[in-house]
Each structure stands twice: as C-alpha cells, then as structure tokens.
Image: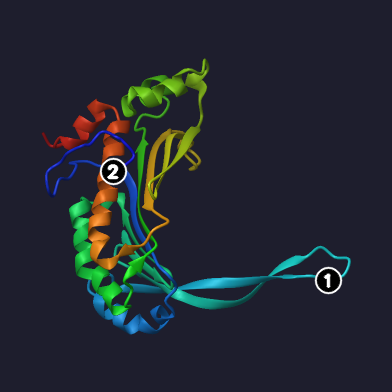
Amino acid sequence: MFGFPLAPREENFKLEQNLLKSAIFQLKFQPHDNVINKKEELQKILSHDFPIVEDVVRSAAEIKFESDKTPILESTQSQADGFKFHTEDRFKSITITKDSLTLNIAGKIYLNFSDSIQTFKELIFPILSELEIKIFNRVAIRKINLVESTQPGKNPPSYTYPSIFENTLVSNFLSFPPINSLESGISTMTFNLGGYKLNLSYGILKNPIKGHPEEQILLDIDLYKINSETDFSKLEEELNLINQEIFNIFTWALNKNLIFSLTSDPKG
C-alpha cells in the first residue's frame, strides 16, 4: 500500500507479548437515525459479551450575541446520538452512533487480529445487518503502542531510544547534542496515497503522572481508507488489508531485537 516491506506471518499469528495501549477499529457511514430506535435489538445481540450499556449524548451549542458585548457560547439541549456497550471489566467496548461504529480493545487483553475479526463476525456484522448499514465511507484501524521504562533515570535516551526503534528513526533524535537531557519529543508524519491515509507518530512522551518520571516511548499507527466507499461484502477484506499494512509498519519501525523478544515466550 505505502511501500513498507511486507512482514509475512502465519494465520492466527500473535505476539507472545505486545506493546499495545489500545487497538481501535472504526467504521463511518452516512447518518442512520434508526440507530436510536434500535437499542433493544442491539442489546439482544451484545448483552452476553457487552452487558454494560451507556447512552452517548451529543450536546448542541449556539453563540449568543448581545449588543456591545463579547459573544457567549451557550449549551442548548442535548440529543441522543447512540450507545456505548462495555464488557464487565471495561477493557473492551463497542460504541454505535448515528454515523459510526467503533470497537476499542485495551492492549492488556488484545490477542491478535484474528480474534478481533471474530468479534466482527459474531457481533458487529449482525449489528450492521440489523441497522441495514451496507456502505462505509471510512474504514480505519489505529494501534497505539507504548513502552514504559521499568528503571526510571537509569538509562539516558541515547541508550533506550535505539533499543526500541529501527536505526533510520533513531538518527534524527540522536543528532541533537543535548539528547540525554531530552524530556519529550514526538515526530508525526502524514501520508496520503491511493485513497488511504496514514498518520504515523513516534518518539518520547513525558509521563503525566506526578512522581513517575520514567519516559514513555510511543509508536502510534493510524491508517484508514477515505474518499471512496466500501461495500459490506468487502469489509472484512478491507480490514485485513489495513491491518497487514499496520503490521508491516510496526515491524519496519522497531528494533529487530525488540521484535524477536516480543515473538518469544517470556516463560522460556
């Protein structure tokens, strides 16, 4: 798709360890007002695996103008926009609104893409059929990887950064003379090719939690199809294509020793 080297893998492949903070799968479509009227039907489909449900509310707002005064933005009535279904542990959720469906999986429970597709087949495809949604104007997958240091302050960025990323991505950071005093720094690039868009971010984040000075190293891959429609019958194929390219990017971006450690059984 974007020219990253193909990273072949077997069917049902999974990493023995992953770096994921979260994996997000999202579909967008033309607004369907019947979503709001289908709460009971959606609960029947999802109640076993996603028993907790919350209403999604979208607040409307208007600007109030008064003579010789600064305009004020005021909230008006809130409108029901959809529903969010959670698993009991809240590590996985499905959010359905009038114009989107999002599956969010916490990294700590993410198994592999095959398992995610099974969720689509067993739950999400039946939902789309119930709502009579057949055409999608955006198909997206985003995987946010985060590495946290277990020994804060022991190793400088000039040591830890090359142990995470491939040499090409390391060089621009190491070119700064005061690299070992780096507190945070993120590079973000956007690519657009043949109807697909890629947002790729990587670098060092400052830990926002007070008292936890350890660095967090980010690899955020957000890839989606835009400017063309995807038919329901081609949805699984499209998700497979996007996920494969994300895996290609993931494998290309990371240090090969780290990749090996992620594919090895930590128990030996």
Circles 1 and 2, Cβ within 8 Å, touching? The answer is no
Place of residue 163 in the rendered image (x, y in percent of width and height, measured from the top left): 32, 25
Q: Amino acid at mark 2?
A: Glu
Name the one closer to the observer, 16 or 35.
35
Q: How is the image coloured?
A: rainbow
Rendering quarter of residue 147 = top left
- Of the two numbered discs 1 and 2 on the same chain, state the one appearing first in sequence: 1
Name the one closer to the observer, 177 or 28.
28
Give left or right: position of 118 versus 245: left
21 relative to 88, above or below: above
| Mark 2: few/some/many CA within 10 Å (<14, 14-19, 20+) | many
Q: Amino acid at mark 1?
A: Glu
Q: Which quadrant: the C terminus?
A: top left
| Mark 1: few/some/many CA within 10 Å (<14, 14-19, 20+) | few
Rendering quarter of residue 221 = top left
Give residue 66's mark. Answer: 1
Q: Nearer the viewer, mark 1 or mark 2?
A: 2
Q: In this rendering, does residue 46 appear at all?
A: no
What residue sits right under mark 2 in the picture? 245
